[in-house]
Image (tube, helix red, strand yellow):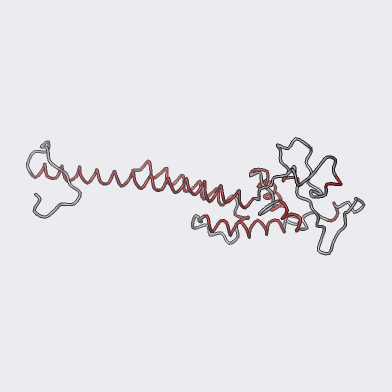
Amino acid sequence: MIGPSVALIAVGGYAKVEVESKIRLIESFNTAALPGTWYLNRAFDKGIYKAMRNYKTNKTLKIEIDTLQIDFRCCGNNKYTDWFKISWIREEYVNTDRKKTEIQVGGYRNDDVPFSCCDSASRRPCINHHVHDNDMHYSYDYRMKTTIYPQGCRESLVTFYGKQLMTYTGFALLGTAAFQLIVVIMTRFLQTSIAQALELGDPEAPTIGYFFKLTGQF
């Protein structure tokens, strides 16, 4: 009984730590409880977008988003084009002399994505600036294939935390509960069998154990 209980605590602790490792990407996260898939889907949607909007000004969130995109092989919230709508590049690093490049009201926005979106399995050098401009790249057509991850990070995170991590934790809970229930039932049968043997005056006498004693049975 002690062993499975300790294992269950360990599994629950691991799940909680894993979720808290992405706490800055989860909007309004309650650390007192493990969230369900539906909650994570909504919370990650808000949290990732918020982190992306602060990517340019918040160093901690920048590192976390870059690490997320590299580790989970994803880009943006729903897809990589989410970055096109956000001014995520600091203006001092924008080359305004380059073709089709201009700083708009509210900051520089273009069909660019962070380098952390680059697919390491791509066979050609990564194209993460002017991703949808075929004319600026040799032998390239984004409609056929890009060099960046097509899947959004929200889907990747929900799949891992909501479906994999939480599912495994749920199975661990059910398995431990079933094991402990079996032990309790067997212990009850053993206890009642021993009690009846003692009543007969012979501790080693063969007797029948029971879970609930029926009236008039013994």
Residue extending farthest left: 201
Q: Which of the pair 88/61 is nearer the observer?
A: 88
Q: Between residues 43 and 183, which one lies in front from this camera angle?
A: 43
Where residue 195 appears, as percent x and y from the top left, is: 14, 45
- At x 12%, y 44%, the residue is 196
Q: Quadrant of residue 122?
A: top right
Q: Given the current orientation, which residue lies at the most extreme bottom position?
A: 105
Could you say which is closer to the camera, residue 57 or residue 116? 116
Residue lying at the far front in this picture: please name it: 144
Q: Viewed as shown, does residue 99 lie left or right of 50?
A: right
From the top left corner, tell me how far across and down residue 68 is, in percent: 65, 47
The answer to whether 58 appears left or right of 28 in the picture is right
Describe residue 118's horizontal placement relative to residue 39 as left or right.
right
The quarter of the displayed image where residue 72 is located:
top right
Task: Give left or right: position of 139 versus 201.
Answer: right
Image quadrant for the N terminus? top left
The image shows residue 47 at horizontal and vertical percentages of: 63, 58
Question: Which residue corresponds to the image point at 24% horizontal and 44% vertical from the top-left?
Answer: 187
The total of numbered circles placed on residues is: 0
Q: Position of residue 56 (x, y in %)?
A: 76, 55
